[in-house]
Amino acid sequence: MRALIVSDIHSNLQALDAVLADAEDAGGYDEVWFLGDLVGYGSDPVACIDRLRGLPHVAVAGNHDHAVTGKLNPDLFNGAARAAALWTTQQLSDEEMEYLIALPEVLQAGKFTHVHGSLRDPVMEYLISEPAALATFALMETPFCLVGHSHYPLVWSEDNGRAVVELLDPTTPLFLESGRRMIVNPGSVGQPRDGDWRASYLLYESERGGDGGVLLHRRVEYDLAGAQRGILAAGLPETLATRLGSGH
């Protein structure tokens, strides 16, 4: 089985389409595992929802998905994120809203737990510190956990009561062994923040590598200028367009 693992699309249709095409070129996939924040920031929320819904997939909710549907107060966001959330709410149909509202916060599937933030705080906690990683390890009921939210492609591993973090490397497959628990973040499709503007995602192959399979990290260029033009044409804050080019 092959899965395409994506997170933090953030209404960036150009980036999403580039990822889907790149994954097909890399051998294709049987289903998509989506880790939250389908909307927010970008200018194509409807098209991004349609793309995902048109594919076999499982998905969890992110904080921006909650803010758009009213499950989370957008006033908790910074000014640009709040403006994008309020704008997005005005673009969506009742059916699209219902799809986002119905997304679970945590999902278990086989050896994997899917969540946007962390198991301690599924939509809001950034899993970027050792205490946060240890808290999620303590709550895991599966060998592996997939998270998003921070927009950083990284892996946390348990090691003698500690949590050790490494950035994912597109040149090095990550082999999964059931006896070694890991928390893995595929990075962001629509708004990377690790200094590399290219869309970031993972491919999972269950039949390769260890008894847990293998994860392959990939980066792909997309129509950055087109995504930036869309943000500006929608009247969204200019900072949301300029930050895409910096990868921060």
Image (tube, rainbow, N blue to C red):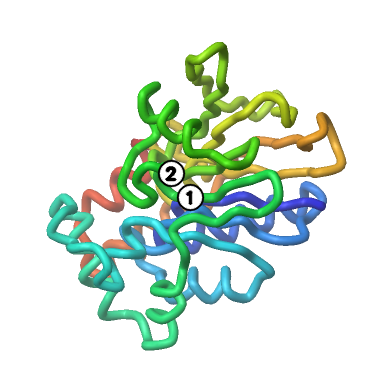
Mark 1 against mark 2, which lies toward the viewer? 2
Where is residue 38? Give x, y as percent. 44, 62
Q: Can the viewer see residue 26?
A: yes
Left or right of 206? Residue 52 is left
In the image, taking residue 120 as reference, residue 27 lies left or right, namely right
Residue topped by disc 2: 119
| Front-most of residues 224 and 177 | 177
Q: Is residue 162 above or below residue 131?
A: above
Which of the two residues, 25 or 157, is positioned nearer the viewer here? 157
Q: Which amino acid type is marked by label 1?
A: Val
Quadrant of the frame with the C terminus: top left
Q: Which residue is mark 1?
A: 115
Q: Residue at x 58, y 47 (%)?
A: 113
Q: Is residue 88 left or right of residue 151?
A: left
Q: Return the x and y of residue 44 as percentages of the image width and height.
A: 41, 69
> What's the residue at 39%, 34% (across, down)?
127
Q: Is residue 99 above or below residue 214?
A: below
The residue under the point 31% across, 62% down is 231
Q: Position of residue 82 (x, y in %)?
A: 18, 60
Could you say which is closer to the camera, residue 90 or residue 138?
A: 138
Residue found at the very far top of the displayed protein: 160
Residue density around tag 2, few if under 14, some if 14–19, many if 20 or more, within 10 Å: many
Quarter residue 168 falls in: top right
Residue 10 falls in which quadrant of the image? bottom left
Q: Residue at x 78, y 55 (%)?
A: 28
Q: In the image, what residue type sits under mark 2? A: Leu
Is there a contact, CB below 8 Å, between mark 1 and mark 2? yes
Report the front residue among 227 and 208: 208
